[in-house]
Image (spheres, rainbow, N blue to C red):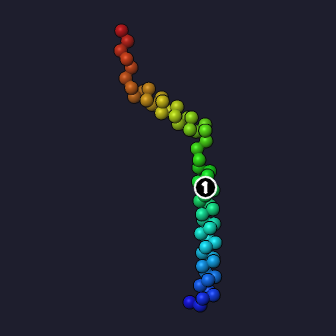
Amino acid sequence: MHPDTHLQLHHLRAAELRAQAETHRLATEAKRPSELRARLGWTLVEVGLRLATPNPAVA
């Protein structure tokens, strides 16, 4: 392969990889859980734990 052609292909591939990395970075940032989502999740955990533990005997 001619060196100039090889270099041009290298530049094109590097640009594609940079674009993919930027897309991945933006998608990762968008997936961060919001505060409301985190609070809801912990509330569901708490409710689940209350349902899973036996109630003390009432006399």
SS class, disc 1: helix
Question: Which residue is at 61% across, 71% downward?
Answer: 16
Q: Residue furthest bottom?
A: 2
The total of numbered circles placed on residues is: 1
- Residue 1 vs 13, above or below: the answer is below
Give the image quarter of residue 40. Answer: top right
- Residue 51 vs 15, above or below: the answer is above
Residue type (three-letter) at the residue carrying disc 1: Ala
Image location of residue 49, percent across then percent down:
43, 29
Image location of residue 15, percent across then percent down:
64, 72
Give the image quarter of residue 59. Answer: top left
Q: Residue furthest top?
A: 59
Image location of residue 6, percent across then percent down:
59, 84
Question: Which residue is at 50% across, 33% downward?
Answer: 44
- Residue 29 vs 34, above or below: the answer is below
Crowd rating for badge 1 (residues with CA inside 10 Å; few <14, some 14–19, many 20+):
few
Question: Which residue is at 62% across, 51% downward?
Answer: 30
Image quadrant holding the N terminus, namely: bottom right
- Residue 12 vs 42, above or below: the answer is below
Question: Which residue is at 61% across, 58% downward?
Answer: 25
Q: Give the residue pinned by disc 1.
A: 27
